[in-house]
């Protein structure tokens, strides 16, 4: 991944520095409003990362000791870690093989009387089928939190991913399409959740620092509850506003490149490319392929062959339950997760990637499979 950055982001950051307002302030508020509108959310709360957005979401739900939260193991480890941060117990559910996402079929068997929430991930930008999960959770009195870290610009049933979500968490890390360096957002359909989230990200303060400093009258703040320091800076938000203006073009270009990969690799035996699900369109934040027993090289051998040709690829999504941090953590059947983790790799894909660069990647794979170049 290479972020699409140019003089526009540099100028926006420089203007913010020159303004003298560097911490969370008017540009953060503008970014929150613009991003929420773009994804069809009623409210946006900018924070320091997607991890802190998820942490904040679970904290606001009151998750604590004795509570279970269903999460995919097939996800970056932060998804599970945020449950542990608030004292809850992560319960790992398996995923569907085609999308790498949770479904009603994989979630329902692990629900118990102690389940308080489900965190569904739009893995690699592929939209999860959230409507059936919303119905399942609503029927059980369980909260559904959407980990949309990778999914800015993806579409679900004709609307942006995250539209109408009770709570959705977003990442602006440089591996994502829209980046602020570090940073994240919590979007919500609930005004009271948004108001409390804004207090909680700023130490539980009754009035924001920006509002206090902009007031013409003395303001004596109070601290209504124990909170956190999860703030975003105005410098980051200024960059984010420029990036948001580029997002639609980023998605368009990535989908063209993804279609190129799909076409040029379609006849490779033992290889499956990630595809759009029937209910939506991916932004292809990650373009992954799966190698099965019909492919002549193992996943790790294919990674080595790509590296030998100067191509930077990486292994597929981790299985969090296999990490030392979760050694001994009980779980049920995660066979699909384990297979995908062992057999998938992520190919280079970025906005400024050229067709000739893409052909280099494809030809290494085709030669490994004993086929002629694309």
Image: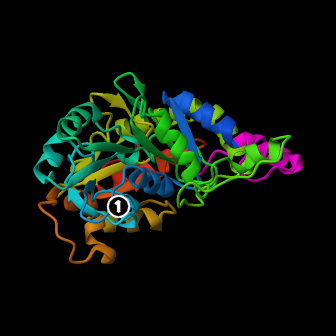
Task: Identify the residue at image location x=79%, y=42%.
Answer: 12
Task: Identify the residue at image location x=22%, y=39%.
Answer: 137
Q: Which residues are magenta?
A: 1-27
- Residue 16 is a magenta residue: yes
Front residue of 324 and 298: 324
At which x and y percent is residue 41?
A: 48, 30
Front residue of 274 and 135: 135
- Residue 20 is a magenta residue: yes
- The residue under label 1 is 83
From the image, which quarter does the C terminus lie in? Answer: top left
Task: Identify the residue at image location x=18%, y=40%.
Answer: 140
Q: Report the coloring of the rendering.
A: rainbow
Is 230 situated left or right of 21 in this image?
A: left
Name which quarter of the figure residue 324 lies in: bottom left
Task: Identify the residue at image location x=25%, y=51%.
Answer: 116
Q: Residue furthest right?
A: 18
Evaluate whether residue 192 shows in this view. Answer: yes
Is 138 situated left or right of 274 in this image?
A: left
Front residue of 2 and 241: 241
Is 3 situated left or right of 340 in this image?
A: right
Vertical placement of 90 versus 61: above or below?
below
At which x and y percent is residue 69?
A: 27, 55
Name which quarter of the figure residue 164 lies in: top left
At which x and y percent is residue 89?
A: 26, 64
């Amino acid at each position: 991944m290479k972020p699409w950055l140019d003089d526009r982001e540099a100028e926006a950051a420089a203007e913010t520095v020159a303004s003298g307002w560097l911490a969370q302030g008017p540009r953060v508020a503008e970014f929150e409003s613009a991003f929420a509108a773009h994804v069809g959310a009623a409210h946006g709360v900018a924070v320091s990362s997607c991890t802190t957005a998820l942490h904040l979401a679970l904290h606001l739900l009151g998750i604590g000791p004795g509570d279970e939260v269903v999460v995919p193991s097939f996800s970056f480890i932060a998804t599970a870690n945020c449950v542990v941060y608030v004292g809850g117990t992560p319960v790992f559910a398996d995923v569907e093989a085609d999308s790498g996402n949770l479904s009603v079929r994989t979630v329902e068997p692990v629900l118990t009387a102690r389940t308080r929430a489900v965190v569904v991930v739009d893995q690699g930008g592929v939209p999860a089928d959230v409507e059936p999960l919303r119905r399942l959770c609503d029927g059980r009195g369980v909260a559904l939190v959407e980990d949309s870290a990778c999914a800015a610009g993806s579409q679900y049933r004709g609307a942006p991913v995250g539209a109408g979500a009770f709570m959705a968490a977003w990442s602006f890390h440089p591996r994502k399409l829209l980046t602020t360096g570090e940073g994240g957002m919590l979007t919500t359909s609930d005004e009271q959740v948004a108001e409390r989230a804004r207090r909680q990200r700023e130490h539980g303060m009754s009035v924001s620092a920006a509002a206090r400093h902009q007031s013409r009258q003395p303001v004596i703040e109070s601290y209504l509850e124990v909170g956190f320091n999860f703030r975003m800076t105005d410098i980051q938000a200024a960059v984010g506003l420029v990036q948001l203006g580029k997002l639609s073009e980023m998605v368009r270009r990535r989908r063209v490149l993804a279609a190129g990969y799909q076409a040029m690799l379609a006849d490779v035996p033992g290889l499956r490319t990630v595809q759009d699900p029937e209910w939506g369109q991916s932004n292809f934040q990650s373009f992954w392929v799966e190698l099965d027993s019909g492919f002549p090289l193992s996943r790790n051998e294919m990674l080595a062959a790509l590296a030998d040709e100067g191509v930077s690829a990486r292994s597929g999504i981790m299985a969090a339950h296999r990490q030392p941090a979760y050694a001994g953590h009980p779980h049920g059947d995660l066979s699909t997760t384990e297979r995908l983790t062992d057999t998938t790799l992520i190919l280079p894909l970025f906005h400024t990637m050229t067709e000739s660069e893409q052909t280099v990647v494809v030809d290494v794979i085709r030669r490994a499979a004993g086929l002629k170049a694309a």
